[in-house]
Image (cartoon, rainbow, N blue to C red):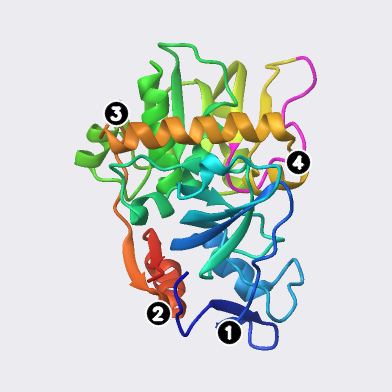
Amino acid sequence: MKNKHISAWSYNTSLHSVEQSSVSHCEINANEILLENEIAGINPVDWKFIHSNPLNWEDGHTPGVDGVGRVVKVGKDVSDTLLGQRVAFHQSLKKQGSFARFSVLNAGRVMKVPESMSSALAGALPCPMLTAWQAFSKIPVKAGRSVLIVGVGAVSKIIIQLLSKAGFNVDVLSKSLSVEMSKALGVINLLRAPEEITLNYHAIFDAVGQDSASRFVKHLKANGHIVAIQDRIDKPLDPPFTRSISYHEIALGALHDYGDSEDWTELMKAGEQLMELISSNQLIIDEPVVFSFDQLPQALEHSEKTKRKTVVKID
């Protein structure tokens, strides 16, 4: 194991920030593994929780939900074939995270990284990739049906491509997405304003928020689907027994508390399949901006200000 001067970035409750620390989280249970991290991915949930601390983290908590590393130790109930494997993970916000040289993880909640994929790219994937898969999986596949994506970011770009590959006609409402990128992703119609909507859709995926998702329900067909990726719609908006709209919410992190082993096996298998598609250039993914481990606070700021995918190299 490497001997480095920074072992982790830990939470400071009074400053609502992270600071260099020396921590040890190397004790593992029977069903766990110990990873020596290579990359820590940064997601909006990281800097949002650092700012507001909604889970009441104590001083010394290590944030970070996404990462990539090599397995250096396995629990007694875990196959030693995992030793030395490079894996990607999405950690619970309630547990010690990826902003550290070592992470302890449930052995059933990691994904093997394709050999041809860089650790930097793999570390940028778990949260947006798995969220996109959950959203895509909410609706039945009906090739030829029209769907609408509202708001474009890392998650939406993956959803667009999954829907397009499944045979849906994908329209996108976005002020920022370029025409060139929309064509590359497989978009049929790129809309710049809600007033340009002329169709009723089989499904709408909203990546903006509750008010936005509620606003676009009126553009659904009977038996349509609204998938709220940010927040949720609390109550059905139509009278009973009318259009029979299905309302969906996405909460990747909640699976750590409410998902069982079957749920996680399915999700990790899907994640590995998606990484294979990405590594073979069948899905377009933006390359992340890479910071060094000692620049982690700057990396958090970069992610927040630019909204670009950002990772930290732990070397």
Q: Residue at x 54, y 58 (%)?
A: 35
Foreground mark, 3 or 4, reads: 3
- Quadrant of res 216: top right
Q: Are marks 4 and 1 in contact (CB under 8 Å)?
A: no
- In terms of sequence position, does the residue under pointer 3 or pointer 1 come before the other? 1
Residue visible at 63% across and 45% down in the picture: 107
- Position above or below: 162 against 224: below
Identify which residue, 179 or 8, lies in the foreground: 8
Expressed as whole percent of the image width and height from the top left, the position of residue 166 reads 41, 18
Percent x, y of residue 152 = 40, 45
Please check the rendered image and state whether residue 239 is part of the magenta-colored stretch, yes or no: yes
Sequence-wise, which precedes: disc 4 or disc 1?
1
Q: Nearer the viewer, residue 234 or 86?
A: 86
| Sooner in the amino-acid sequence: mark 4 or mark 2 | 4
The residue labelled by disc 4 is: 234
- Residue at position x 49%, y 57% in the image: 67
For disc 2, the marked residue is 295
Q: Main secondary structure of the magenta part?
A: loop
Relative horizontal placement of residue 288, taking residue 244 as reference (left or right): left
The residue lying at 62 percent from left, 71 percent from top is 62
Task: State the extent of the magenta-drawn residues as a range.
Answer: 228-241
Q: Amino acid at mark 2?
A: Gln
Position of residue 37 measured from the top left corner of the image (x, y, whole percent): 47, 62
Viewer-closest of 144 and 173? 144
Camera sees residue 41: no
Q: Which residue is mark 1?
A: 21
Quadrant of the rendered image containing residue 308: bottom left
Placement of 6 over or under 31, stated as above or below? below
Q: Amino acid at mark 4?
A: Asp
Q: Nearer the viewer, residue 71 or 167?
A: 71
Q: Secondary structure at mark 4?
A: loop
Whole-number angstrom distance, CA of label 4 to CA of label 2 = 40 Å
